[in-house]
Amino acid sequence: MTVKPRTHSAHWGAFSAELQDDKLLITPFDGDPDPSPLLNNFVNALRHPVRIATPMVRRGWLENGPGPDDRRGADEYIAISWPQAIELAAGELSRVAAEFGPQAVFGGSYGWSSAGRFHHAQSQVHRFLNTTIGGYVRSVNSYSSGAASVILPHIIGDMNEIARRGVSWEEIAEHSQLVLSFGGLALKNSQVASGGISEHTERGFIQQAARRGTQFISVSPLQTDLPQEAQGEWLAIRPGTDAALILGLLHVLVSKQWSDEAFLARYCVGWDKMVAYLLGKEDGLVRDAVWAADICGIDAARISALAAELYGKRVMITVAHALQRAEHGEQPVWLGLVLAAALGQPGLPGGGYGYALGALGHYGKHHNQVSFPALPQGKNGVEAFIPVARIADMLLHPGEAFRYNGQTRHYPTVKLAWWAGGNPFHHHQHLARLRQAFNRLDTLIVHEVAWTATARHADIVLPATMTLEREDVGGAPTDRHLFAMQQLAEPYGQARDDYAIFSELAKKLGREQAFTGGRTARQWLEHLYQQMQEKCEQQQIPVPDFDTFWQQGQLTLPQLKDGGRLLRQMRRDPERYPLPTPSGKIEIFSQTIADFNDADCPGHAVWLTPQQQPDANHPLYLIANQPASRLHSQLDYGQHSVNQKRDGREVCRMHPQDAAPRGIVDGDTVQISNARGAVLASVEISEQIMAGVIQLPTGAWYDPQDPQAAQPLCRHGNPNVLTLDIGTSSLAQGCCGQITLVEIARYQGTPPQVRAFEPPTIGHRLVVGGSRKGGEALG
């Protein structure tokens, strides 16, 4: 059967596609100057054997009923019908809500499952729990920017304003003389964006800037964090030490009288306290270039020369997400802003501070005049929440106190987690600990497309459709194209979209009208489109009706060129346009944070030594960064992702100086290990990584040789077996998954076969009598 090309959109690009004899043929959007190869992950994904075809229930849960169970992740599954699955899931949700209240239910989702604005799994699960049981325990912030999203509002403003409406790539290409990027500007990161991205323009703007004469300098352990088009300089830095380097640069600026004292006096507070810290007036420790060099591994003379290069130029300081995904991750975010302020750059065209520029395709773009609305989620009646990266702490330590953003809070006691659109066995750290945490639950219910590690730990597994198997509208506030995401294929097996699943569950719970609002999925798309249409009409922006839009497949919307507006307005008139900080200015010193009295995040930015330091047993840094071959762990079984592996395993990179004494050569299977476990990977020997560092991207599906091991061996190469599960600080409790310490060795013997993309054992149906607590016997 052949289906004519239809428009669609993904987090990594817009495209049209058609099915020819079950083969998906993809054509990137013709307006995209640099289409992402990630589109090729769709080619073999629709009918892959790892897809989930029917509702499943874990045998141990079915036999023994809800409750803690160490067999999660190692148990077999029983196929059941949709009516049985609805009965079991609705019954268990009702039981927990009745016995413990909605505060015993965690609504888990990460929002990246689809570029569609209606079938946005996070919105769907939140709306379902709000409208059926009155709320849920929620998570706040993200793994990507957990530290930055908390620190930035205290010192300058909301992260979305700084990142999404920061200085644009267009402005950089026209005005910037020097771009100093802490953590680089890797194009693999900016090829993806929530809500979709139709035009990948970063490469072109970087090339345009370089041709005009912009100097790019990337501070990173990885040379590949700066694209070749930048023609830039690579400053190899010891992982996690950017804060020390920035302090050294600031000291040079102060000692040479190169700081912009007029800007600092008018637009900032606390510069005097920072200078006192740099000069060691309280503790006698001078944070100069020599001091910084000893910590970060960059020569003191080069630090001094870099400060001289910054002085007197239009400078853009960027700080990548990666820097704050580490111990004390708040500090480099804060210090990047301080450095930009010391140079007097914030608010100038092509100058200033760009948090996370290059981290997502959204950042550095213009905003639409009108955006497509989101699905209303309803009211959450539960006050309790956790920082997103503290999920294992919550499950392992219910009732215990934790610090967050100046408050002492307590972890709720969660009995049931409902997960849709996320894979915590990708995002989270120390996976053996995460498994122990999930084993504490009474019940884990998961909607999934395929047998991810999270699905393999679930008690009830509900098969969900892929984005290609349903209708939606794809769009983002920073993408001028809106796309009709037309259905390209029939659902796999008995898979249903999240809305259909939740609608049936809400009906079972007597709350169908509250959840659906009386609308079908198509009627919701029409309703949301009409809301956007009305806003456009108010601003005299002509748009077609929904049917015409759906037939055309796309719509172009006008945009506003207001990047950097917050700081630009402040610089023009600080009294009329103060920043949304307590002082109305850039807070180099924050009295608010100082009053929190948390030793791991004082009132001004500092250097705090990480607890993870190389030693004889673990002499190498491991960088667990974002992958180039997929978004997070999505479609790891897709054609493009699989083609980038070697012998079915993820590829790690290491420097020849580290490989030679260990007898490791290019193409070897290696074992990377520390006290938390071990992973196998195929090694690539490269001089594009600094000595003393190895790099293994996240996103390889977790594939433990023994799922119940306290120190598991992942056959596939998931680095989060090894990473440390602690918060960045008491302020933000963000994720520390970017950096850890390991040893690496050539694997001896025949490596075990990777089984990440094979379904778990499926058992036979059975009759259960009397032992279950939450539903009827199944036959």
Image: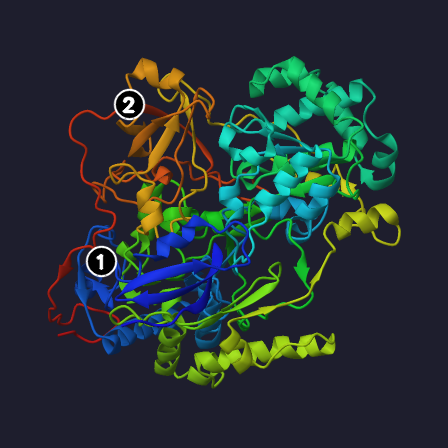
Q: Quadrant for residue 768, please give it.
A: bottom left
Look at the image and tell me whether residue 287 can be seen.
no
Point out the image quarter for the C terminus: bottom left
Residue at which label 1 appears: 49
- The image shows a total of numbered marks equal to 2
Q: Is residue 130 above or below residue 282?
A: below
Q: Is residue 462 above or below residue 176?
A: below
Q: Residues within 10 Å of mark 2 (few under 14, many from 20)?
A: some
Residue 599 left/right relative to 704: right
Q: The residue under label 2 is which amino acid type?
A: Ala
Task: Give whichever of 760, 119 is nearer the camera.
Answer: 119
Q: The residue under label 1 is which amino acid type?
A: Pro
What is the secondary structure assignment of the residue under circle 1?
loop
| Discs 2/1, front | 1
- In the rendered image, residue 407, in percent from the top left (x then y), is placed at 61, 49
Q: Residues within 10 Å of mark 1 (few under 14, many from 20)?
A: some
Residue contact at pointers 2 and 1, CB within 8 angstroms: no
Q: Is residue 453 above or below residue 27?
A: above
Q: CA distance from mark 2 to mark 1?
A: 33 Å
Which of the marked residues, 2 or 1, is nearer the chain's N terminus?
1
Point out the image quarter for the N terminus: bottom left
* Residue drawn at 75 percent across, 29 percent down: 274
- In the rendered image, residue 490, in percent from the top left (x then y), is placed at 31, 72
Look at the image and tell me whether residue 594 can be seen.
yes
- In the rendered image, residue 121, in percent from the top left (x then y), is placed at 44, 65
Q: Quadrant for residue 557, please give it.
A: bottom right
What is the secondary structure assignment of the residue under circle 2?
strand
Task: Give whichever of 3, 579 is nearer the camera.
Answer: 3
Task: Give whichever of 695, 762 is nearer the camera.
Answer: 695
- In the rendered image, residue 303, in percent from the top left (x then y), is placed at 66, 19
Q: Quadrant for residue 119, please give it.
A: bottom left
| Mark linked to residue 745 | 2
